[in-house]
Amino acid sequence: MSFARVALLAAAFVAVAAFSPFSSAGSEKVALSVAIDGAIGPASTRQLEEALDVAAKRDVAVLILQLDTPGGLVTSMREMIADILASPVPVIGYVAPAGGHAASAGTYILYATHIAAMAPGTNLGAATPVEIGGLPSLPGGDKGDQKDQGDQKGQGDQKGQDGRPAGDAMMAKVTNDAVALIRSLAELRGRNGDWGEKAVREAASLSANAALQEHVIDFVAHDTTELLQLADGRTVDVAGKKQVLATKGLPVETLEPGWFIRLLSVITDPNIAVILMLVGVYGIVFEFTSPGAVAPGVIGTICLVLGLYALNLLPINYTGLALMLLGIAFLIIEALNPTVVLGVSGVAAFLFGAAMLLRVEGPGFAMSWTVIGPAAALTLGLALLTGTYVWAARKNPPRVGGEAMRGLPVEILDWQDGEGHVLALGERWRARADEPIAAGDSVEVADISDLVLTVRRREAARNGARQ
């Protein structure tokens, strides 16, 4: 009996030891992988922040940051770089899969990672800042001219300070700031700073093998297994401390983005945000015009809140936002009181506001005329349609009040000496007549004054109409 008790105690001790938090010290390390696929923006920043937080809490060996991006917003890029530099977990930047790229903002992020690698068939570079805000490109615009202008901006306009346009001076400041950033990252990670500056000033790009030869990356890896094998044994600086990586043969766990990050990646597209705002404003307007419908008000409020939340995360120009809202207000007034002037002014204000909405632009974060134009046309069409119905309603006969009672058939209740009472709309009214009328005659309302109806024979009214 005592032996059985000892056996049970021993089994309980083993179970507790196996599931105890302290037993994790001897557990096998893992590598956590997170993929940034698409434009760099608020959703990418949130995704990397959550991945680094999970990696730190689980004390993983490394975080693999897989990149396939055309670039994005400078503000989001700098936040991601700051998170990587402050991370207590080594971050391996890996441009993959084959055919992918780390262009523009992706190049800076790759420079910031502790280990930089690329898969065969990938490329990086073209890091010239092109985020000075302005009007969206017109459809069918001269792409060659735009490219030449971008190259000139990337070189910082070397003509000198005298007579330099304000736009070129601003672009030179932005370019020099970008050069300083990529050089500081290159110095921190021991990479080629000269080529980094060339990528900024001349929009230079490199293939995977060329990047390895230029000492921009540490190695080329076909997959994550080879990536971890080649990273094994390398010494990196993690938050100011030297650390030797032990990554060979580590199991890789992929961290998928949650529903909120997926939603964020959709609504932070400025075109989607504008559409959400339009749906929200008109949903609320329809709710006010048709009280009790409920659905337009609920859907409109949700869309408006989502649109404003998305715009709050983007670097927007509040003057542009104010112009858009003013344009919508003008169009609503135009629908209720057609003047043409307000309609045209509303469309103009909406278009200019949408064009000015973003203070900066980047790949995947630019207003599109294919969205702005139809949205303005739809808004104007809705205003004109509503105005047409309102104008037509003015010409229709009145449906309420004294005017609406003229021609209404009534029933005589009692009548004497040209006066009496009649039944109209289910109510008892005092009435009088300017012609002989007797009980039982078919009469209708001719006029109303001081709550007294003037009635006449319906036959006489019809005869008068025929004459």
Image (cartoon, grey):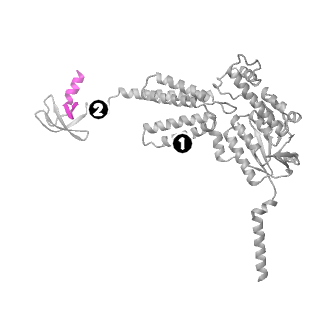
Residue 379 painted magenta: no
Q: Residue at x 28, y 30 (%)?
A: 403
Residue 73 in the image, given as x and y percentages of width and height: 69, 34
Q: Is residue 161 above or below residue 284?
A: above
Give the residue type at disc 2. Ala
The residue range painted magenta reads 444-467
Residue 340 in the image, given as x and y percentages of width and height: 46, 22
Q: Nearer the viewer, residue 197 or 145?
A: 197
Q: Quadrant of the C terminus?
A: top left
Q: Secondary structure at mark 1?
A: helix
Q: Nearer the viewer, residue 122 or 179?
A: 179
Residue 387 in the image, given as x and y percentages of width and height: 44, 27
Left or right position of 127 against 286: right
- Circle 2/circle 1 CB separation < 8 Å: no
Q: Residue at x 25, y 41 (%)?
A: 426
- The residue wearing badge 1 is 302
- The residue wearing badge 2 is 404
Which numbered disc, 2 or 1, marks the residue that appears first in the sequence?
1
- Residue 256 visible in image: no
Q: Secondary structure at mark 2?
A: helix
Residue 457 painted magenta: yes
